[in-house]
């Protein structure tokens, strides 16, 4: 099979691999995303980049961003560490709606298939004023696109990889002047039975599969009024790896339904976006794969959100975002019965671009919740374009992470008196451009108080308390090179991250925060053929809070090639972990060594 | 994780083994190596094979961490629940790995691994020819497995209705704690299942008698001392120690008036030692039921996950599951602290070796 696929590459090939998509033309359902892009550091991964790491969102973020992904073995439970913060301090945002679990307060990275999206945006730094709880270290934006006047396009993508892995996607889009339609179905599965013989490691019971169905519709009644609707249905089963043959095998199932519908109204001075959203998460854990579920839950969120943008003048605007949410949940095997809560919030932002060189905005937010007292939040951002090769941005904000239903209501142990975690933070970006190079340097600092930590209260009961204070600070540097000449196109990005997250009591680095990380991504395209390199170096990473145990530093290298056989057919081949590195992102859970994938993409 | 409601190691079998050892005249100082002294069990974090065993010399002066991995060059397993001793062997019961690793107790070289019919093994006890392992997954499986000492073959299981936790050998019989508390998924509370201790006769390997303790509390511990079994049961107001005659199941009661939620019981040199719900450690003479209860000290940290008395010293651990635990040593008669030291992840037991 592999040999035959190789042969394909040398059959006459024509065509040009598409270049980076321009963000400006893209119509995101999340109308704030382009606004926050003005001052925030954002990295956008479009469809082509997503397909380079089609296996999972964990792989995509690990190889194409500097976020630390803790994965209990490939495809299993996975959580992010963004700028040295905890998993609960990273927000996952689906088309503008925060979708972190109301039970866990974090996103389950391997239960968000990136094939469902045409854009994965990574926004660095605080964003609670707009994106709510957990937007502290940063936020990850899963965006669908509903655009107009693009006609019909379809994509079929299928990838087969080592360890019985397949990732498939079928997408069809149609749009004319007033109607837009986007349907996407994807399915990923893997036997995932990889071995690391040097460590006597077998990823036993590691299989997983998931299926997503996404449907988007938009209709413009007239130039001023547009209705849109985007929904997602997701179903998954992950088995959790066990370390020995005799260990009881466990599994986890998730069913998710998300739907949002909205009405956009545009006039000369008013842009209003009214949305209704419904989010439902169901999950079941099976302590023994052959028995009935041991625990689980259902969370439902009903959301009404209005985004009113009033243009005072051509260059200044007030933006009032009001939101009401009703959350309800039902736990099983957690002592969480049927908690409910109402919450409302008001955000007011003022944006000013009167000066050509200086853009600034101010924001404030207050949330009113039944269960806990939410802090007053603010943001202040400015971008100063000093000359044609240097600009600088400043972001100051206060952000929060709300206590979750588990934190508050888990029985026994839940603590109804918890406060939210609060973070005061600042970052300054310096961006230089020279010819085909751009250089960004961003130091950041966060002071996080009232961090919620679960500790043992008695010999049998664990309870969460607002105890930790953490300082997270660091430096991010990015160097990109982008050049087209004749039929060649080169794009490369080198990024370096230094991050410290220090528990102010113990003065130790938080666990799973690598101090140093380097990512290198490069794409080279010539005519019909393209190559890409993904490499990252992850420094020594402590796995406990006492700086005693750690996973060693490692460098992982992936190489891929793709070829357009015709304007409609593209073939790809990829070697992951080409140097056969032995590595772990969570101690004891080894990741796969060298492995392969072939894919076929059809466009019509 | 509810598994973190795991309790301490089996003390009685250790004592018993020592009684046996003395008869068999083992010379601890004449072994080739080295780990004669105190063994510390660190259960590790749940769902990771990071359980370890630390060694501490009897005079507390030298220590070595992670001795199993050092000797055998492999991870021990996932959740080291307890260590039992028989002859020259240590039986390392690994709850979430569903296995028992048998290693030489002095040089720690692995001799065998037992996996047959194990489902969340908890505690272990020995007779001359057999060993008895409780299995309790707090979710439907509550049984006592019986194995042949000579070749580790599985003999049979005895199923219980509600629980199978501590197991001890006393006076030639096997006693099993067959009640405790279970998590009630619909109410989110820990519900007491009942008040029974079950006697199993090794000659037939059948249930001989079921004893129902008369208090309304929860059975928290079961130990063996000088041929009798002692059960600890406690309520939010008072606690009770029952001295059980293993031959006929009759018992006498010592009421620990005003001691709330006592959680652990050890017996050494004629004294009971126990901890209450507030982590206060007490001693009381075993001989007279009216003897005074002496408050020794309050264990530091979140609790005393591991607790034992070795050579007149009390060992307690403040277990951490995210990093090193801290263990403390106290003088058993005065309650003054002698030493504190770092131990592995989730320290849950101290054993004389």
Image (spheres, coloured by chain):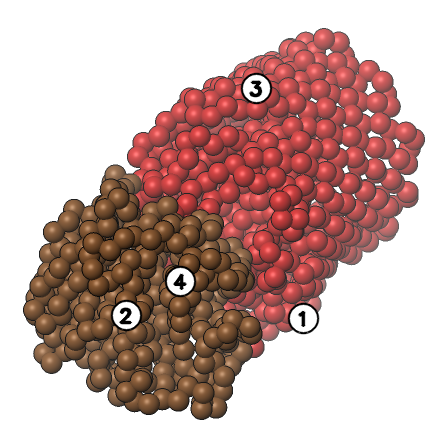
Chain colours: A red, B brown
N-terminal of the pair, mark 2 or mark 4, is 2
Chain of the residue under the numbered disc 2 shown in the image: B
Provide the residue designation for mark 3.
A366
Between the C-alphas of marks 3 and 4, the distance is 57 Å
User: What is the secondary structure assignment of the residue under circle 1?
Assistant: loop
Q: Nearer the viewer, mark 2 or mark 4?
A: 4
Tags 3 and 2 on a common chain: no
Tags 4 and 1 on a common chain: no
Chain of the residue under the numbered disc 1 shown in the image: A
Above or below residue A454? Residue A270 is: above
Q: Nearer the viewer, mark 3 or mark 2?
A: 2
Above or below residue A429? Residue B278 is: below
Please indicate, yes or no, whether residue B162 appears anywhere in the rendered image.
no
Q: Is residue A506 left or right of residue B284?
A: right
Between the C-alphas of marks 2 and 4, the distance is 18 Å
Give the residue displayed 74% in from the left and 30% down from the top.
Answer: A395
User: What is the secondary structure assignment of the residue under circle 3?
Assistant: strand
Give the residue displayed 90% in from the left and 29% down from the top.
Answer: A386
Please tell me in which quadrant of the rendered image residue A407 appears.
Answer: top left
Provide the residue designation for mark 2.
B12
N-terminal of the pair, mark 1 or mark 3, is 3
Between the C-alphas of marks 3 and 2, the distance is 59 Å
Provide the residue designation for mark 4.
B332
């Amino acid at each position: 099979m592999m040999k035959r696929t190789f042969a394909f590459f040398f059959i006459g090939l024509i065509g040009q691999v598409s270049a980076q998509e321009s963000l400006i033309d893209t119509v995101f359902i999340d109308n704030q995303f382009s606004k926050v892009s003005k001052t925030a550091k954002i990295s956008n991964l479009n469809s082509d980049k997503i397909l380079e790491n089609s296996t999972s969102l964990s792989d995509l973020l690990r190889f194409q961003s500097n976020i630390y992904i803790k994965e209990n073995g490939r495809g299993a439970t996975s959580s992010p560490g963004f700028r040295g913060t905890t998993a609960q301090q990273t927000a996952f945002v689906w088309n503008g709606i925060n979708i972190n679990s109301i039970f866990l307060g974090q996103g389950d990275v391997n239960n968000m298939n990136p094939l469902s999206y045409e854009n994965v945006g990574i926004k660095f730094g605080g964003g609670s004023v707009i994106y709510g709880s957990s937007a502290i270290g940063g936020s990850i934006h899963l965006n669908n696109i509903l655009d107009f006047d693009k006609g019909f396009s379809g994509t079929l993508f299928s990838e087969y990889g080592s360890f019985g892995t397949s990732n498939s996607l079928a997408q069809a889009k149609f749009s004319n002047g007033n109607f837009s339609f986007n349907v996407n179905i994807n399915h990923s599965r893997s036997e995932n039975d990889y071995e690391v013989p040097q460590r006597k490691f077998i990823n036993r019971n590691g299989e997983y599969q998931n299926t997503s169905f996404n449907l988007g519709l938009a209709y413009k009644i007239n130039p001023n009024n547009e209705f849109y609707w985007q929904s997602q249905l997701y179903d998954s089963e992950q088995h959790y790896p066990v370390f020995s043959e005799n260990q009881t095998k466990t599994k986890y199932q998730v069913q998710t339904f998300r739907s949002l519908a909205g009405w956009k109204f545009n006039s000369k001075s008013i842009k209003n976006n009214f949305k209704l959203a419904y989010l439902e998460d169901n999950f079941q854990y099976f302590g023994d794969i052959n028995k009935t579920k041991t625990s689980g839950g259902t969370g439902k969120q009903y959301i009404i959100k209005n985004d009113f943008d009033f243009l005072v003048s051509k260059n200044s605007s007030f933006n009032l975002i009001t939101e009401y949410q009703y959350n309800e949940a039902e736990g099983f095997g957690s002592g969480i019965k049927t908690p409910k809560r109402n919450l409302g919030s008001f955000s007011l932002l003022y944006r000013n671009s009167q000066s050509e060189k200086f853009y600034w905005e101010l924001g404030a937010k207050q949330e009113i919740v039944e269960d806990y007292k939410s802090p007053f939040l603010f943001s202040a951002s400015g971008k100063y374009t000093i000359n044609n090769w240097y600009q600088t941005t400043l972001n100051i904000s206060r952000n929060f992470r709300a206590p979750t239903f588990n934190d508050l209501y888990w029985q026994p142990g839940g603590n109804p008196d918890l406060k939210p975690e609060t973070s005061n933070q600042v970052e300054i970006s310096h961006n230089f451009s020279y010819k085909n190079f751009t250089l960004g340097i961003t130091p950041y600092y966060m002071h996080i108080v009232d961090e919620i930590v679960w500790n043992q209260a008695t010999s049998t009961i664990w309870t969460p308390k607002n105890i930790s204070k953490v300082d997270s600070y660091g430096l991010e540097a990015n160097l990109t090179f982008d050049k087209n000449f004749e039929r060649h196109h080169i794009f490369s990005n080198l990024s370096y991250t230094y991050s410290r997250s220090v528990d102010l009591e113990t003065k130790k680095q938080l666990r799973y925060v690598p101090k140093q990380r380097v990512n290198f991504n490069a794409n080279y395209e010539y005519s019909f053929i393209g190559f890409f390199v993904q490499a990252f170096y992850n420094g020594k990473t402590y796995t406990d809070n006492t700086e005693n145990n750690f996973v060693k530093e490692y460098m992982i290298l992936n190489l891929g090639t793709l070829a357009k056989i015709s304007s409609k057919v593209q073939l790809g081949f990829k070697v992951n972990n080409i140097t056969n590195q032995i590595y772990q992102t969570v101690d004891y859970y080894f990741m796969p060594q060298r492995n392969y994938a072939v894919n076929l993409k059809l466009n019509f | 994780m509810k598994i973190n409601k795991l309790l301490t190691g089996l003390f009685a079998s250790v004592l018993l083994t020592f009684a046996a050892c003395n008869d068999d005249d083992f010379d601890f100082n004449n072994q080739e190596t080295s780990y004669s002294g105190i063994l510390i069990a660190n259960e590790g974090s749940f769902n990771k094979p990071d359980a370890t065993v630390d060694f501490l010399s009897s005079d507390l002066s030298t220590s070595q961490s992670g001795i199993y991995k050092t000797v055998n060059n492999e991870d021990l397993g996932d959740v080291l629940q307890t260590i039992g001793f028989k002859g020259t062997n240590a039986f390392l019961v690994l709850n979430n790995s569903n296995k028992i690793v048998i290693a030489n107790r002095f040089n720690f070289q692995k001799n065998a691994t037992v996996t047959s019919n194990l489902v969340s093994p908890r505690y272990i006890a020995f007779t001359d020819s057999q060993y008895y392992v409780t299995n309790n997954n707090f979710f439907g499986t509550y049984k006592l497995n019986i194995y042949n000492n000579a070749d580790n073959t599985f003999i049979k299981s005895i199923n219980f209705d509600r629980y199978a936790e501590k197991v001890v050998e006393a006076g030639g019989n096997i006693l099993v704690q067959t009640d405790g508390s279970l998590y009630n998924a619909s109410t989110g509370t820990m519900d007491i299942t009942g008040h029974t201790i079950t006697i199993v006769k090794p000659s037939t390997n059948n249930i001989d008698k079921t004893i129902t303790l008369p208090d309304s509390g929860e059975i928290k511990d079961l130990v063996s001392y000088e041929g009798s079994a002692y059960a600890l049961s406690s309520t939010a107001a008072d606690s009770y120690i029952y001295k059980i005659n293993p031959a006929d199941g009759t018992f006498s009661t010592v009421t620990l008036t005003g001691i709330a939620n006592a959680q652990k019981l050890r017996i050494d040199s004629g004294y009971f030692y126990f901890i209450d719900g507030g982590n206060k450690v007490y001693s009381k003479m075993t001989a007279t039921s009216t003897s005074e209860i002496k408050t020794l000290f309050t264990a530091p940290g979140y609790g005393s996950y591991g607790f034992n008395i070795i050579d007149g010293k009390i060992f307690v651990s403040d277990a951490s599951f995210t990093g090193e635990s801290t263990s403390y040593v106290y003088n058993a008669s005065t309650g003054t602290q002698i030493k504190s030291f770092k131990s592995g992840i989730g320290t849950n037991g101290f054993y004389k070796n």
